[in-house]
Image (tube, helix red, strand yellow):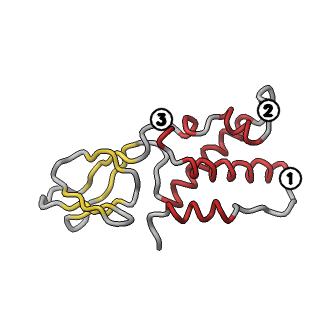
Amino acid sequence: MAYLDVITLATAKNYLGIDDTLTEDDNDITRMIKGALRYIENFTNVMIYARDKDYIVNNYECRVYDYPINTVNTSDLTATKKPKYTLYTTNDSSVDAVSINVGYATASDVPSDLIDVALEIIELNYYGEKERGAAKKELSDLSKEVLYQYKRFYI
């Protein structure tokens, strides 16, 4: 699965009110779809689609803020779920990294409110590019609230 399986070009164009036969902006809209979903992942640590990621084990433990967690590549770890992360611990000093599959397995698993936020980001980017020089619009308070509800890591 990939970003374009979650929000298709056709879905984004429909949301933007763009006729399917107009294709001159398809590459830009595709870039905006990927950018919006990547932004949501970076902001929240909620992975939109499943992929393997490597995490470093330091002092016999590893904190994984990414969500959802699907599979772990080793049985040498013990998982403890915390409110905003999962703590993996091991007694094996040779374990210095772990590969974990994180993210939603299917597009239908992705929370609809995150998709709505992504569509709003795409709209802001698309019409912001078309109206250069206009006052910069920002994400709605509702979308900001959704992002903060899903946010898994605070600095």
Q: Residues within 10 Å of mark 3 (few under 14, many from 20)?
A: few
Labels 3 and 1 touching (C-beta < 8 A): no
Left or right position of 111 against 71: right
* Residue positioned most to the bottom: 155
At label 2, which amino acid type do we have?
Answer: Glu
Q: Cα distance, mark 1 to mark 2?
A: 17 Å
Residue receiving disc 3: 1
Q: Cα distance, mark 3 to mark 2?
A: 26 Å
Mark 3 falls on what kind of element? Answer: loop
The disc, 3 or 2, on the residue closer to the chain's N-terminal end is 3
Q: Which mark is residue 31?
A: none
Labels 1 and 2 touching (C-beta < 8 A): no
At label 3, which amino acid type do we have?
Answer: Met
Q: Which mark is residue 131?
A: 1
At label 1, which amino acid type do we have?
Answer: Glu
Residue 18, x across and y down, in percent = 79, 36
Total number of numbered discs in the rendering: 3
Pair 3/2: label in front: 3
